Image: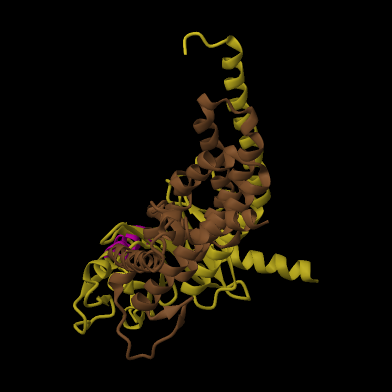
Amino acid sequence: MKENTDTFLKGLWRENPVFVMLLGMCPVLAVSNSVINALAMGLATTFVLIGSSTLVSLLSRFIPKQVRIATYIVIIATFVTVVDYLIQAISLDLYRALGAFIQLIVVNCMILGRAEAFASKNPLGKSLLDALGMGAGFTLALLCLGSVRELLGNGSLLGVAIFGAGFQPWPIMILPPGGFFVLGGWLLLFAWLQERRTARRPEGGLAHAD
Amino acid sequence: MTEQPRGTSIRMIRALSGAAVLSGFLIVFVYQATLPRIAENRRRALEQAIFQVVPGAQHRITFVIGPDGQAQPEGQAKGEGLGIMVYAGYDGDGKLAGIAIEAAGQGYQDVIRILYGYSPQKECVTGMIVLDSRETPGLGDKIETDERFLKNFECLDVRLNQQQTALLHSIESVKRGEKTQAWQIDAISGATISSKAVSKMLDESTRQLLPLLAANLKRIREAGEEVSRQDAKTAK
């Protein structure tokens, strides 16, 4: 049981795909300019991750290792196409806001990475938990960036104005450079927290040495 | 690798073909399942845009202007596609309220697509909305939100000359606060390029299409009256 919880939780914190492993930076920087975009992108990626991990885990016995990458890519691309149509059916505005980045989920290395490193070697249940955890971690990270960028760049959260009329928004925060600034800020915070924890129990630091 | 048994090749082909077939089924299934919703979303988005730029419109008929300059209702158009589409909006009594036209042109970052409304009665552009743009947030994207800029399109003068063949005045963009004529567009300071792009695409599009529309106006008017007559019949 503890192992299962751990499989899920590691994606949120200890092996967070964005803040710790720095995977899938392209969508992280590109579409985290508002909370709603970040949330939609996070959920879309989670959906693809869950779908592909499920299939890869179920089919791994039948996939010869010479063609595994090609097969994984086909499976991932299938789910990306599915999510592309689903988002168009849900809202065209959202689809327009996310633009090409939906299709680019195919090349999010986090997804191929989980298929190769985890789903192909683990049973269905564990793979699903891993995909859920990683997806949640990815969504969380996108939300961390999205909320800060929308707040500073547009003075709002989820489209609702937070500051009074006197607030002068910083458009740079919703432009690409803002993505780098905010990501840098969060990485700094994460590294600092990690360091503080290691410093507090010097021997325990070995448990998750890089 | 050279000594691998033949069985391995077959397994590899089987795995890849299996994945492809599975993928094919899944994608086509989802495509078919979502198609009606997506088409409906697109239709509603377009309709909303049309009704926004053509005040008073309650329903619309799409016309295709063919290469011969004749406007035909969509579906009845002869010949191969390649026509220009315009959307005629009618009020509740089937009277022509205005015509919505799509225009596009190069903006600061990428192509901007807009939809504008044209009122043949008032001879002006009655509204403009941006359908698609990648203009800089906070600067160029003000063409979508700046109230003073959008006010230009409440009634932008696009009168035709007597022969109905060309615009009397071409649409031009002027610096903020220097607008003196009804055919000028008061640009946004800080978004000059985007404002100019909008005025240029409006100018090109009206120059090309308004004379064509003028020639087809009778047919476009009658189409709406016919629909409302049919509606009245079915209502009875």
* Magenta: main secondary structure: helix
- Residue extending farthest to the right is B236
Q: Which chain is brown?
A: A
Counting from the top left corner in percent of width and height, residue B52 is at 49, 74
In this picture, residue B137 sits left or right of residue A79: left
Q: Nearer the viewer, residue B15 or B126?
A: B15
Q: Residue at x 25, y 61 (%)?
A: B108
Q: Residue at x 58, y 57 (%)?
A: A6
Q: Residue at x 54, y 41 (%)?
A: A115
Taking the magenta stretch, the answer to whether it contains residue A165 is: no
Q: Which chain is yellow?
A: B
Q: Nearer the viewer, residue B113 or A183?
A: A183
Counting from the top left corner in percent of width and height, residue A145 is at 40, 67
Task: State the colouring used for the structure image.
Answer: by chain
Taking the magenta stretch, the answer to whether it contains residue B202 is: yes
* Magenta residues (range): B200-209
Eyeballing the image, is B141 above or below B35? below
Q: How many marks?
A: 0
Eyeballing the image, is B234 above or below A106? below
Counting from the top left corner in percent of width and height, residue B150 is at 36, 78
Q: Nearer the viewer, residue A38 or B183?
A: A38
Residue A115 visible in the picture? yes
Q: Quadrant of residue A171?
A: bottom left
Q: Quadrant of the N terminus of chain A?
A: bottom right
Counting from the top left corner in percent of width and height, residue B125 is at 38, 73
